């Protein structure tokens, strides 16, 4: 496709934020261009929620915001304007119906993220908004007339550069380039450079919602084991920093799964500060120490002639048994009536505090999202427009906002895209003027 010399709006990135911004900025006779560097738009959205797309969450506004940590306040206006029920209705009008699942998570009725993407693309097409793939924005500058000059590198089908560099002019630009995680989907952090070029502060970017590496080979021995209804807590110098209840998973390098991903933000921060971090897993969170001891005593008294192994069978998934036997150094054949009080105490402690020293975290390649990004202090929360450069907007994960798993991140991408689009729809302003 040939590019026009001038556009009213150029949107960089065809993820959820960019597509929403494009659709909502539409007005007849307006020339809008969405540029996407990958061969297909919204690759990350297609794989979101394991291909099922957990689009949003049932949570109330206050609870929703709390999942974003201290930067959640930035989203107050965006969510007041366009929140979870608005998003669900929006897609229902586009033909995608959602169902509510555990944890307040909404998924498409047919479990297909691709349907969400196709609905957006159909709308973009119907509005005759130009969407051009294999087009990477490599730089933006401003002309003496106050227009944005957008430099685009065209790419071959294999992703290599064609060497063809094109320039186009825009009154307004929306940076919706996403973060740095899962770079194979196209989110490689280019938006941070574009923002920094205009003097924007970019807070340090780090992998978030990321699996955690642990010392030793215990996790490897348990690889593939998923634990439900456990409590994991972060300990630094024996002090609790954070804790979560739910499901986790052991991998060949450490731990992952919902509660670990939720804790990972704090873990990454602590490791960056060079703090010694431990993860302690409570395998019996429903019982306090006293109640658990009573349960152990009852089991021992009622089955005094049985082996220690038979007791462990009642308490643990099979895969954990050899690990416990090794850690406790108690023979699996030992009769329960021979079990010393001190051995029972060690078993209780291990059930309540199954601990791992944290050695690191996985890279952006495996992180669900990116923490850090374009500083919220320099973006108007009511319009998503830069406070530094008129006509420059930001939407989605490129902004310094990130949340837990549960549909919060996609809602933020859609809501910020919606607010930017609506603000642009209202504006006639030429862009590029440094304020
Ligand atoms: C495996 C996985 C599963 C996830 N599941 C969920 C989930 O179920 N629920 C949830 O809420 N969140 C989920 N997330 C997070 C969520 O997908 C992201 O937060 C969301 O996609 C961010 O939207 P975005 O539009 O800001 O950025 P992105 O979706 O990253 O889109 C940015 C787009 O910009 C393009 N781009 C980048 N730079 C340029 C450039 N210079 N020129 C042109 N184009 C460019 C990229 O190719 C990309 O297509 C998941 C993330 C991952 C990795």
Image (spheres, rainbow, N blue to C red):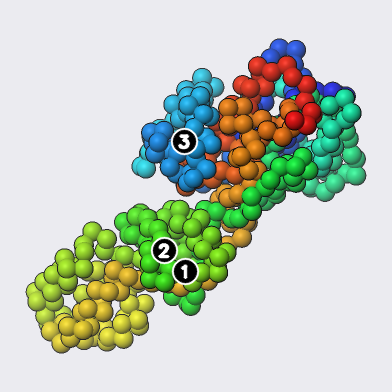
Instruction: Decide which of 58, 42 is in the foreground and name it.
Output: 58
Mark 1 touches mark 2? (CB < 8 Å): yes
- State which quadrant residue 389 falls in: top right
Identify the residue shown where x is 74% and y is 19%: 429
Give how far across and how far down residue 175 sits, in percent. 70, 36
Q: Which of the two labelled residues, at mark 3 and mark 1, occupies the earlier sequence position?
A: 3
Give how far across and how far down residue 5 sits, in percent. 88, 24
Q: In this rendering, would 85 be left or right of 419?
A: left
Q: Closer to the observer: label 3 or label 1?
A: 1
Q: In this rendering, would 217 be left or right of 137?
A: left
Residue denoted by label 1: 277
Identify the residue shown where x is 60% and y is 44%: 400
Give how far across and how far down residue 346 sits, in percent. 26, 79
Residue denoted by label 2: 234
Q: Closer to the observer: label 2 or label 3?
A: 2
Q: Is residue 102 above or below residue 283?
A: above
Residue denoted by label 3: 56
**Residue 326 visible (yes or no):** yes
Q: Residue furthest front?
A: 435
């Amino acid at each position: 496709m040939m590019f026009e010399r001038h556009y009213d709006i150029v949107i960089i990135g065809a993820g959820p934020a960019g597509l929403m911004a494009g659709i909502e900025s539409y007005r007849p006779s307006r020339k809008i261009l969405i540029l996407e560097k990958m061969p297909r738009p919204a690759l990350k959205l297609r794989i979101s929620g394991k291909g099922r797309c957990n689009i949003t969450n049932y949570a109330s506004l206050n609870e929703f915001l709390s999942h974003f940590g201290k930067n959640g306040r930035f989203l107050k206006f965006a969510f007041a304007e366009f929140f979870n029920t608005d998003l669900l209705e929006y897609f229902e009008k586009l033909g995608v119906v959602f169902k509510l699942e555990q944890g307040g998570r909404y998924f498409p009725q047919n479990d297909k993220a691709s349907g969400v993407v196709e609905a957006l693309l159909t709308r973009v097409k119907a509005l005759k908004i130009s969407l051009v793939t294999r087009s990477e924005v490599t730089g933006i500058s401003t002309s003496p007339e106050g227009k944005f000059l957008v430099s685009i590198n065209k790419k071959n089908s294999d992703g290599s550069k064609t060497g063809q560099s094109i320039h186009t002019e825009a009154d307004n630009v929306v940076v919706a380039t996403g973060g740095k995680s899962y770079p194979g989907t196209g989110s490689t952090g280019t938006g941070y450079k574009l923002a920094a070029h205009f003097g924007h502060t970019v807070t340090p970017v780090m992998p978030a919602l990321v699996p955690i590496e642990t010392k030793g080979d215990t996790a490897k021995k348990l690889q593939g084991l998923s634990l439900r209804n456990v409590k994991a807590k972060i300990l630094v110098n024996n002090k609790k920093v954070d804790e979560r209840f739910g499901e986790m998973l052991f991998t060949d390098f450490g731990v992952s799964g919902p509660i670990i991903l939720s804790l990972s933000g704090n873990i990454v921060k602590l490791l960056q500060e060079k703090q010694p971090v431990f993860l302690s897993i409570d395998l019996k969170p429903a019982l306090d120490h006293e109640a658990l001891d009573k349960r152990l005593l009852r089991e021992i008294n009622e089955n005094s002639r049985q082996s220690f192994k038979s007791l462990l069978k009642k308490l643990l998934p099979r895969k954990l048994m050899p690990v416990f036997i090794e850690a406790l150094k108690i023979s699996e054949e030992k009769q329960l009536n021979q079990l010393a009080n001190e051995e029972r105490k060690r078993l209780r402690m291990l059930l309540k505090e199954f601990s791992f020293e944290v050695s690191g975290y996985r890279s952006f390649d495996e992180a669900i999202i990116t923490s850090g990004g374009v500083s919220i202090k320099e973006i108007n929360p009511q319009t998503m427009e830069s406070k530094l450069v008129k006509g420059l907007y930001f939407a989605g994960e490129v902004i310094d906002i990130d949340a837990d798993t549960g549909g919060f991140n996609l809602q933020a991408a859609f809501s910020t895209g919606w607010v930017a689009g609506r603000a642009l729809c209202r504006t006639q302003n030429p862009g590029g003027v440094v304020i």
